[in-house]
Structure formats: structure tokens, C-alpha cells
Amino acid sequence: MPLPGITLAGTNQALDQSLNSVISEFATLRDETGVVRDCADMATLKEHTGTAYQKVNYGRVLMQSVSDGAETAAQVLSDALTAYTPGEVEGKVILAGSTIRRSADASLEKNTAMILNNAYDLKEDADGCAQFASFTTSALGGTAVCSPGYGAAAASGLHVGNNTSFPEPAPKPWFWVIHPQSAVPLFGRLVPYALTPGGASTPYGATGGVHVGTTRGNGGGDEPGSIGYDVITKGIEQIGYTLAGMDVRMDANITVTSSNATGAAFSRKGLLYVSEVEPQPYVDEILSKALRGAKVYGMWGSYAWGVWRAAAYGIPTTFDASLATS
């Protein structure tokens, strides 16, 4: 209880206007760090080479059995052209001169540049994720929850280029990029976890939510040195996790639509990133006297995403991505 007659400074006190508002820390929001670019085949559209990166693919020539002394008819060699046209992206912030002078954040300009850089990474990665649906093979999963079996199915498809009549094996390395929420049941089924101690009657993640209460199944897989143990202690993305020959990545920038998210299993050659101009930061001072020292902070670049051999070198995978709530 304050002494009677004592003068206090603070909210609803006698000197309630006498304290400066001192902010202790300035923080920025965190976006998903770019995932997909590291998985893509990289190309550069050089200056003075036009508006598009153009890639030609030759068709097949088939060997045929012939009788002694006979020859087969000549085959026509075909080619197919795919063009990837980069487009520019830009973001900017205009800071008034008075804002720069008065802001309590002495690093406001530096933080603005960092925020713009994060925004560029977010846009670039989200555009890459949007390409997954462009692989033309029917998507695996549908509205199902994710499991290692789907990974094995995707890898088997890449082994034959999704074609058993004329196999076109997708070149390695292979990647499988899925939404983090889709990875929850995959995580549990690799340990393995189960709804019952025996682990036989109801597999983890099948019904009632993707991570309902579980106990360890009898199948083991969580001993030190095992894949399950590494997944439990480090997480899938922390250990360069490989499933069925594919490097598994999680990307929160995959769009979730009606609780489902479409990622993809693909060859690096199947996803192409064409860079025309790498991210360019800039600062322009506005010379107009009316704006009194305002500055424009911006970043721009030019790139294109695209798929290559869309039917053979990648497979969309669509799984439930409901946010875990229990």
C-alpha cells in the first residue's frame, strides 16, 4: 500500500504523463526459409539471349529385330521445345523522413531491408511450390493422410518415369516435398507408433485425427541408431532424411486448400528454376522537398519456375494437412 501523499509516476498515477515509452526490443515476423530452390535444376537466362530460356528434348529411336541380311526402315528423329519466360517481382517500402528521424528503432532502415529480403524469399519459394501441381501424372494420396507407402509408390513411379510401356527413369537426385502438417502421420508411421500397444489393430493416423494419442507399437524401430530413433529425436528435416531413395523436405509455403496440400516427388531435373536477375536491393532518396527526406527501400528480381518432362520426372502427392489440434 503506497504511503499517503507519495507522488508516483505511471499509468493512472499523479505523474501519468512523465514517463517516456521505451521499447526494449524490435522483432520481425519469421517466414518459411526457401526450400524448393535447393531442390531444383538451376539455369540462368543470360543477357542478350532473348526473353525465354528454351530447352529442347529429343524423342526416342527404337531398336528392332531384323533377319540376317535385312535392314529396318529409318526412323524420324523428333524434338520438342519448352520455353521458360522469367517475370519480374518487386516489393518496396517508403519511409518518411520524419519516420526515420523519430522512430525509436535506430535500426529501422536495416530491419526494413531484412523484411524485404524475407518477402522475396517467401514469394520465390511459394511460386516454386505452386509448380508441384503441374506434374501431369495423377496425384497420389487424394485426401488420405501421408504414409511411407505413398513414398514407396512415388519412388517406384520415378524409377520408370511413370510409364511401364516405355520406361524413362527419372535421373537422381530425387526429392519429396510435403507440407509440415502432412508430415505428422508420416512421422508417426516411421517410428512406428500405434493406437494400441500391439500396433496391429489400428495404425497411427488412420482415423480420428493425424496424431491422436498413441503408444509404442511392438514393431520397434525407435532404438538408438534406428531410423525411427533419429526421426523422434531430430525430426525429418533435421537429418537429411531419405525415404525410398528420396530426400524428404517440408515446406510450409505449400498452399492448403480444404485441409489438403499438394506437394510432389520429383527428380531435380524435373523442376527448373531460371534466374534472369538475382535479388537486387535498392535505396532511393526522394528529392521532392514536400516529402522532406523520405526514402524508398525496395528489392526486385526476375525468375521463372517450370517443370521438365512433366509426365515422367515428377508425381504430385496430395495429403491431409489439417492443423493438429489435439
Image (cartoon, helix red, strand yellow):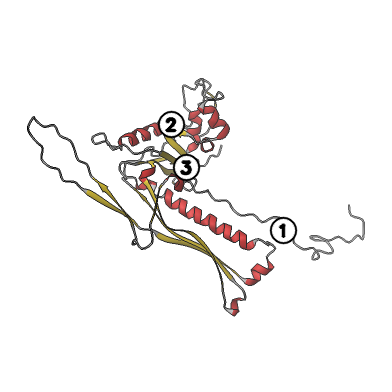
Circle 3: element type: loop
Circle 2: element type: helix
Q: Residues within 10 Å of mark 2 (few under 14, many from 20)?
A: some
Q: Could you say which disc has been placed on residue 179 in the image?
A: 3
* Residue 230 spot, x, y in % from top left: 54, 30
Q: Is residue 289 visible?
A: yes
Residue farthest to the right, as pictured:
4
Q: CA distance from mark 1 to mark 2?
A: 49 Å
Between disc 2 and disc 3, whose residue precedes?
A: 2
| Circles 3 and 1 in contact, beta carbons < 8 Å | no
Relative vertical location of residue 262 with respect to residue 222 in this rendering, above or below: below
* Residue 78 spot, x, y in % from top left: 20, 47
Using the rendered view, name the quadrant where residue 222 is placed.
Answer: top right
Q: CA distance from mark 2 to mark 3?
A: 15 Å
| Circles 2 and 3 in contact, beta carbons < 8 Å | no
Circle 1: element type: loop
Q: Is residue 222 left or right of residue 80?
A: right
Q: CA distance from mark 3 to mark 1?
A: 36 Å
Kind of residue indicated by mark 2: Pro
Q: Is residue 194 visible?
A: no
* Residue 131 spot, x, y in % from top left: 39, 49
> Which residue corresponds to mark 1?
23
Using the rendered view, name the quadrant where residue 162 is placed.
Answer: top left
Kind of residue indicated by mark 3: His
Q: Could you say which disc has been placed on residue 289 in the image?
A: none
| Circles 1 and 2 in contact, beta carbons < 8 Å | no
Residue at figure coordinates x 52%, y 48% from the top left: 33
Residue at figure coordinates x 48%, y 29% from the top left: 190
> Which residue corresponds to mark 2?
148
Foreground residue among 203 and 240: 240
Between disc 3 and disc 1, whose residue precedes?
A: 1
